[in-house]
Image (spheres, rainbow, N blue to C red):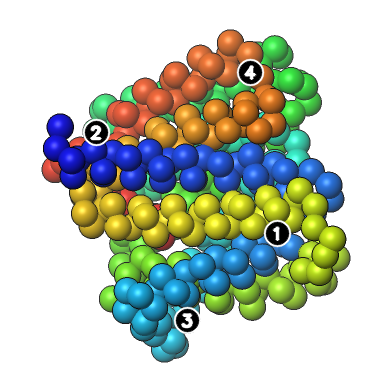
Amino acid sequence: MSRDRLILIALLVGIGAAWGITQPFAKIAVSEGYRHFGIIFWQFALGALILLPINGLRSGRLPMGARHLAFYTVIALIGTLLPNSASYTAAIHLPSGILSIVLSTVPMVSFPIALALRMDRFSALRLMGLLLGFAAILLIGLPEASLPDPAMVWWLPLALVAPAFYAVEGNFVARYGTDGLDPVQVLLGASLVGLILAAPLAVMTGQWISPLPPYGAPDLAIVGFSTAHAIAYAGYVWLVRRAGAVFAAQVSYLVTGFGILWAKLILGETYSPWVWTALGLMMLGLFLVQPRRAEPAVTPA
């Protein structure tokens, strides 16, 4: 194996590990009373602080015309504000590893949306992948011994809201494009607009998080997952351009696997045989719904 290939694989693993750790960090962030709008504000703020110098090194441009601002607003809403409001609320009640498995349904949900918009062709294999993902969710929710507390099952539908919005976002970008913006510009612009949207929501709902010390584990977790997400996303963008969308799409397996691994190491979570079976079905489903070389990949912004 060539040195370049090894570097690309190492980067792929690093991106998967970074994205995977965001779920345990999110669980820690909500563990002592912080709630979604306050967390999302600081996610936008920290993401913008990290992406500003990255964008400066790449081009330094960030278009702010009316149509660009409208696009940033849509991405901020369907890519972060709405899905993360649901996922951070679900994180209060569900194990982090379960959330990692549920979030891996994004490409499965994307497939029927793309079919409905006539942006993709029907494929029996991808349909089978969709059904396997649905079966995995049922294995998590139906058996009484699957979750630590059977009452947690009522929070599974809320956890599924986030991947649904991410799937909508991916298809929106695939259908309408980014108006000449590169992905880092899109994420930076959405973060800046998101700050304006999230700030009044955090204040009005009493969820504002003070930036002043003392700092506890939830504060450090917010910094951790915001940093990990921004760096992993920038790395993913580079990887898509360097190695292609099909190679980069394999990060989905790593994000799920590392999400469970980090949850075990950081949070000490344990899972029933039902959950491990669900993970196996989800991985197989991911393999079947991933784009092949002849098909374009739908990548959320």
- Which image quarter is the C terminus in? bottom left
Residue 209 appears anywhere in the view: yes
Q: Nearer the viewer, mark 2 or mark 4?
A: 4
Tags 3 and 4 touching, CB below 8 Å: no
Circle 3 Cα neighbour tier, 10 Å, few/some/many (<14 / 14–19 / ≥20): some
N-terminal of the two: label 2 or label 1?
1
Q: How many marks?
A: 4
Query: What amino acid does circle 2 point to?
Result: Ser
User: What is the number of the mark on residue 123?
Assistant: 2
Query: SS class of the residue under badge 2?
Result: loop
Relative depth, front residue between 216 and 26 = 216
Q: Residue most toward the front?
A: 3
Query: What amino acid does circle 4 point to?
Result: Tyr
User: What is the number of the mark on residue 69?
Assistant: 3
Instruction: Give the residue drawn at x 58%, y 10%.
Output: 273
Relative depth, front residue between 24 and 294 = 24
Query: SS class of the residue under badge 4?
Result: loop
User: What is the number of the mark on residue 271?
Assistant: 4
